[in-house]
Image (cartoon, grey):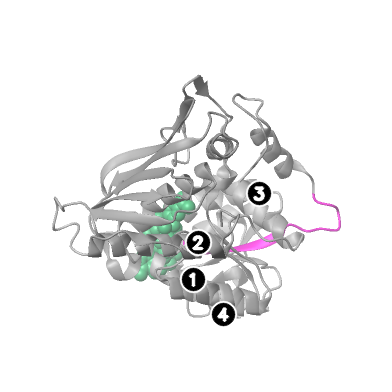
């Protein structure tokens, strides 16, 4: 996350830095990189496709879908030739398509590992949606596959490119309001029945892995620290039919090396969207914090505001920049692995009723937040 010493307001360096990064033109020798979207569901249709119309360093050039009926609309909308429409079966032949540099995996969680690995084996750079995968082993396999192919791997953590969440990181890490003592993070929604997110095999877990992951992320970038332990309690189910396979809600606490505590909550039955930090000399918060639009920032000395950005366009363009300059993403596979380790520890704590220590982070991720 950013480390500049900016404070509140529209002229914040955070927003300016982002805009500059986005607007610096490509040299005439550079062509925008080609992106293939894998899985044309809601997130691809409503967010990533439109974002790829705004990116400067890359362009949507191919689609991979199991629904041939969707292809025609996408081909028209994004000017994609028939030869660049793939199915899940013939996806590996994307290896022979020089138009495609980056493959973006936007499938149900349990399919992330297989398709990320197949993309790396096809010689492509990969962006994979969150959560990175459903087990730690799968995340490690994905990192190994990209490394073996000599390609970059990044996770779709859009909030690392968005001014309000960058401001939270800046205020917390630069101690704008003094040392942060406590973070409160809540993310939840009332989910419709019958969707793959409620199927354990496809989703890998419930609201924790889907939206609770943003609380884990928010606490880490606001504090600039990695948790050393987690203690969790699964909420009592109020709807056994909808939540037959996955948890309905989860509450957990994360302890950080400085003594800071993060109190977190996620739910598939309750709307919540908060990231709040309480510090020695004041407080600062976003509510909503993780939505695409309409984020609101408030602090003990007043509200803070930034211009609306298309965070996915910034995120994808940053990755294209990384590929062009052979630079690791600031949201790399290792960060996705880190988070899946934390989510796994939260489930373990809820299951055993015991605090779970995350001692490996203090050595392995020394002085880093990923
Ligand atoms: P959707 O259910 O809307 O779309 C998933 C798509 O995956 C489907 O439309 C389908 O595309 C394809 N698919 C292939 N196999 C299956 C299957 N067995 N069951 C269901 N779909 C299948 O999901 P979302 O777009 O909301 O989420 C996709 C991923 O993106 C998830 O990992 C989610 O966590 C992540 N996400 C991230 C967000 C963020 O803010 N970073 C926001 C929302 C989602 P097709 O018909 O083309 O084959």
Q: Residue furthest top?
A: 302
- Of the two numbered discs 2 and 1 on the same chain, state the one appearing first in sequence: 1
Give the label on residue 139, or none: 1
Mark 3 element type: loop
**Residue 113 visible in rendering:** yes
Location of residue 209 (image quadrant): bottom left
* Range of residues picked out in magenta: 26-40
x and y percentages locating residue 87 in the rendered image: 49, 74
In the picture, the disc for residue 361 is: 2
Residue 83 on image: x %, y %:
61, 72
Query: Circle 4 sits on which residue?
Result: 92
Residue at image mark 3: 55
From the image, give the main secondary structure of the stretch colored magenta: loop
Residue 2, picture quadrant: top right
Q: CA distance from mark 4 to mark 2?
A: 36 Å
Q: Residues within 10 Å of mark 2 (few under 14, many from 20)?
A: many
Measured from the top left, where is residue 126 in percent x and y? 59, 66
Identify the secondary structure beneath mark 2: helix
Q: Mark 3 to mark 2: distance in Å?
A: 35 Å
Check disc 1 and report its element: helix, strand or loop.
helix
């Amino acid at each position: 996350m950013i480390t500049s010493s900016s404070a509140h307001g529209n002229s914040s360096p955070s927003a300016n830095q982002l805009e500059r990064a986005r607007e610096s033109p490509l040299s005439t020798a550079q062509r925008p990189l080609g992106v293939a979207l894998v899985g044309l569901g809601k997130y691809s249709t409503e967010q990533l496709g439109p974002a790829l119309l705004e990116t400067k360093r890359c362009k949507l050039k191919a689609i991979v879908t199991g629904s041939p009926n969707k292809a025609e609309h996408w081909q028209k909308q994004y000017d994609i030739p028939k030869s660049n429409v793939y199915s899940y079966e013939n996806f590996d032949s994307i290896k022979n398509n020089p138009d495609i540099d980056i493959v973006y995996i936007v499938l149900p969680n349990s399919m992330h590992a297989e398709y990320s690995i197949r993309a790396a084996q096809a010689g492509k750079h990969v962006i994979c949606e969150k959560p990175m995968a459903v087990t730690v082993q799968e995340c490690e396999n994905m990192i190994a596959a990209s490394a073996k192919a000599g390609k970059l791997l990044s996770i779709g953590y859009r909030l690392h490119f968005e001014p309000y969440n960058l401001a939270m990181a800046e205020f917390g890490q630069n101690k704008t309001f003094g040392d942060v003592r406590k973070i409160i993070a809540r993310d939840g929604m009332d989910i419709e029945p019958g969707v793959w997110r409620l199927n354990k095999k496809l989703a890998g877990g419930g609201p924790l892995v889907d939206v609770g992951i943003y609380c884990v992320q928010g606490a880490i970038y606001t504090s600039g620290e990695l948790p050393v332990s987690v203690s969790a309690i699964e909420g009592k189910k109020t709807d056994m039919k909808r939540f037959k396979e996955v948890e309905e809600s989860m509450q957990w606490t994360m302890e950080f090396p400085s003594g800071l505590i993060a109190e977190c909550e996620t739910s598939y039955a309750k709307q919540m969207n908060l990231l709040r930090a309480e510090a020695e000399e004041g407080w600062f918060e976003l509510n909503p914090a993780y939505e695409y639009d309409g984020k609101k920032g408030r602090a003990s000395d007043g509200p803070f505001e930034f211009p609306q950005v298309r965070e996915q366009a910034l995120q994808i363009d940053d990755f294209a920049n990384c590929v062009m300059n052979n630079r690791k993403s600031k949201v790399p596979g290792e960060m996705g692995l880190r988070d899946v380790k934390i989510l796994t520890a939260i489930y373990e704590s809820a299951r055993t009723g015991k605090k779970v220590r995350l001692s490996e982070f203090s050595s392995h991720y020394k002085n880093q937040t990923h």
